[in-house]
Image: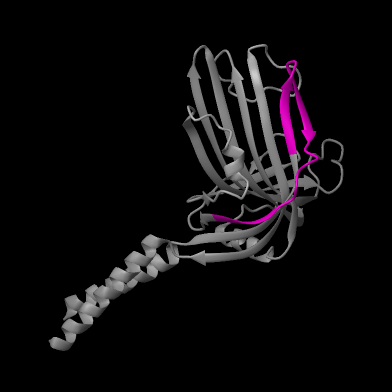
């Protein structure tokens, strides 16, 4: 009997632990795309212009990430003396395609193969002086303003090489949210925790964040190995044959922020309930 009670207690503890520790945040936002910029290569110079024919569109966008066990960085100087910063990164990121993703990727050459892809969710806080820095030897101001920025990013690269040419298509999706803080004395700054981030997102429901949505596709072709970075805005090497791009930006309103157990958690909790039921039946028969 004691063994059965111990088993039941273990199952209940497992169910409770899973319910507490495995959480996913589902962020649903309404996007209003407001502008589209076109980039092209003209006589080895990159030209960027607004698309006058662009028609704004509204759509729903969903982002998921794990709330628990984020990687919280140390509070570190930024290198500019008067500022310090701290970064928090969340795992389990799943950023859904948008209404524009299929058409943006429609021009990707079929022979290109996926070589790199990642998704990111994080929040950072840094300080900036309320007033200009006082003269030496007093290096740091007494009060600083905390500025926060949260971002969700998904990016992928496709590449092909052959016939003396190499090409890359880069697709990037991002949601950037500004988090304004208040003036704090000296070095008072704390990294964003999971609870902080969730509270911030919930507090933003229904509020518009201008320019928070951005999605782009960049394609370039050259006669040598692909460039490790995009060519600069000035003149580009003669080896670059093509450098075309589209970037769409827009405003965002957070519709809902929901914390849900992951599918694995549901399965474990189901097994735990089955175990508790079995223990109860065995006790009745005994």
From this view, report whether residue 14 is shown above or below residue 37.
Answer: below
142 within the magenta span? no
79 vs 241, nearest the viewer: 241
Query: Which quarter of the rendered picture does the N terminus lie within?
Result: bottom left
258 vs 3, nearest the viewer: 258
Percent of width and height locating residue 33? 72, 50
2 vs 96, nearest the viewer: 96
Q: Residue at x 75, y 15 (%)?
A: 43
Query: What is the magenta range?
Result: 37-63
Query: Which quarter of the rendered picture does the C terminus lie within?
Result: bottom left
From this view, report whether residue 194 is shown above or below residue 130.
Answer: below
112 vs 190, nearest the viewer: 112
Q: Residue at x 49, y 58 (%)?
A: 68
44 within the magenta span? yes
Percent of width and height locating residue 123? 62, 50
* Left or right: 19, with 99 as reference point: left
Going by the picture, which residue comes out furthest to the left? 286
Q: Residue at x 13, y 87 (%)?
A: 285
Q: Residue at x 65, y 38 (%)?
A: 216
Which color scheme is applied? one colour
* Left or right: 274, with 161 as reference point: left
């Amino acid at each position: 009997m004691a063994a059965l009670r111990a088993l039941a207690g273990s199952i209940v503890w497992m169910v409770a632990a899973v319910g507490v520790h495995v959480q996913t945040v589902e962020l649903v936002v309404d996007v209003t795309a407001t502008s589209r910029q076109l980039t092209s290569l003209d006589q080895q110079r990159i030209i960027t212009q607004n698309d006058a024919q662009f028609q704004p569109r509204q759509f729903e966008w969903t982002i998921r990430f794990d709330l628990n066990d984020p990687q919280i960085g140390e509070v570190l100087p930024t290198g500019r003396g008067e500022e310090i910063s701290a970064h928090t990164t969340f795992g389990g990121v799943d950023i859904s395609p948008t209404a524009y993703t299929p058409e943006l990727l429609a021009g990707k050459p079929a022979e290109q193969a996926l070589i790199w892809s990642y998704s990111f969710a994080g929040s950072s806080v840094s300080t900036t002086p309320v007033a200009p820095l006082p003269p030496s030897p007093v290096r740091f101001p007494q009060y600083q303003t905390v500025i926060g920025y949260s971002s969700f990013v998904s990016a992928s690269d496709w590449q092909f090489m052959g016939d003396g040419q190499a090409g890359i298509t880069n697709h990037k999706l991002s949601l950037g949210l500004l988090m304004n803080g208040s003036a704090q004395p000296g070095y008072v700054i704390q990294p964003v925790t999971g609870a902080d981030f969730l509270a911030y997102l919930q507090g933003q429901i229904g509020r518009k964040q201008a320019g928070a949505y951005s999605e782009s596709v960049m394609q370039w072709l050259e006669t040598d190995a692909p460039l490790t970075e995009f060519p600069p805005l000035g003149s580009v090497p003669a080896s670059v044959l093509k450098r075309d791009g589209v970037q769409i930006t827009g405003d965002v309103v957070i519709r809902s922020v929901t914390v849900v157990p992951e599918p694995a958690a549901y399965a474990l909790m189901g097994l735990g309930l089955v175990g508790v039921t079995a223990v109860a039946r065995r006790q009745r028969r005994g």
